[in-house]
Image: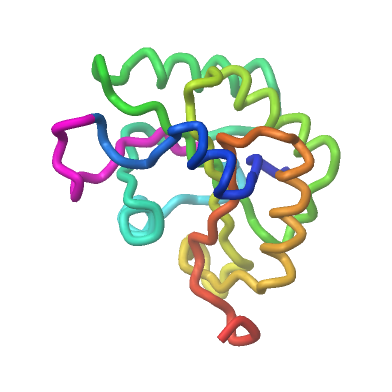
Amino acid sequence: RAYGIAAPEEPAAASGFTDSPPGGSDPGALIPAIVAVPEEITPDHEALKRQLGSRLGAVPAAVITVNGDMDADAEKLAQALQSRQPGQSRRLVIIQESWQPPIRENLTWIRHMKQAAGPETGAIVGLIGKPEKAGSFAAPVPETERIIWQQAVNSLGDPYTRVEVLGEKSRENR
């Protein structure tokens, strides 16, 4: 199951979309994000929090478990969005195993989740590699897998959705 939409940096920057907190906020503050984790991945919440903070400058405001059912997952997302603080940034991070190919079904699901989150919500497909041990959010992501995901997510045509690597760079990337 694939989640996310990637776009080049230029359209997002040109549109004024930014990861920075609203004016006057502490620029070093972490941005709250709703994190969608596939049910087959058992999240290590501390590792997830570390990776989101160091890689994306984000902190989990809510973690939802998703199973690929578009309606049920969109409902979970809607509930999480309702619980956010007024004026709080809208951010969605969709965890995806990079070694799973971004098939059409997954891309359709990603598009549906992004639509459910609303056009003002920035979305990030957070890639993790094949874990060497259970629950590892830092598993290496090969560059070829990142490129495949980037191209698939770009094909969705949403400039507010992008692909980011949450896992470590693999040896082939160094």
Left/right of residue 119 with respect to residue 55 in the rendered view: right
Q: Residue 81 appears in which quarter of the rendering?
A: top left
The location of residue 92, given as percent across then percent down, is: 48, 34
Residue at 56% in and 75% down: 132
> How is colour applied across the structure in the image?
rainbow
In this rendered view, identify the residue nearer to me: 13 or 32.
13
Q: Where are the magenta residues, as a range?
A: 23-36
The location of residue 155, given as percent across then percent down, is: 78, 41
| Number of numbered markers | 0
Quadrant containing the N terminus is top right
The answer to whether residue 53 is above or below residue 19 is: below
The answer to whether residue 169 is above or below residue 44 is: below
Is 115 magenta? The answer is no
The location of residue 75, given as percent across then percent down, is: 55, 15
In this rendered view, identify the residue nearer to me: 33 or 19.
19
Left/right of residue 13 with respect to residue 20 in the rendered view: right
Q: Is residue 63 visible?
A: yes
Q: Is residue 64 visible?
A: no
Is 32 magenta? The answer is yes
Left/right of residue 82 with respect to residue 166 in the rendered view: left
Residue at 48% in and 22% down: 120
The answer to whether residue 95 is above or below residue 97 is: above
Left/right of residue 147 with respect to residue 60 in the rendered view: right
The answer to whether residue 69 is above or below residue 9 is: above
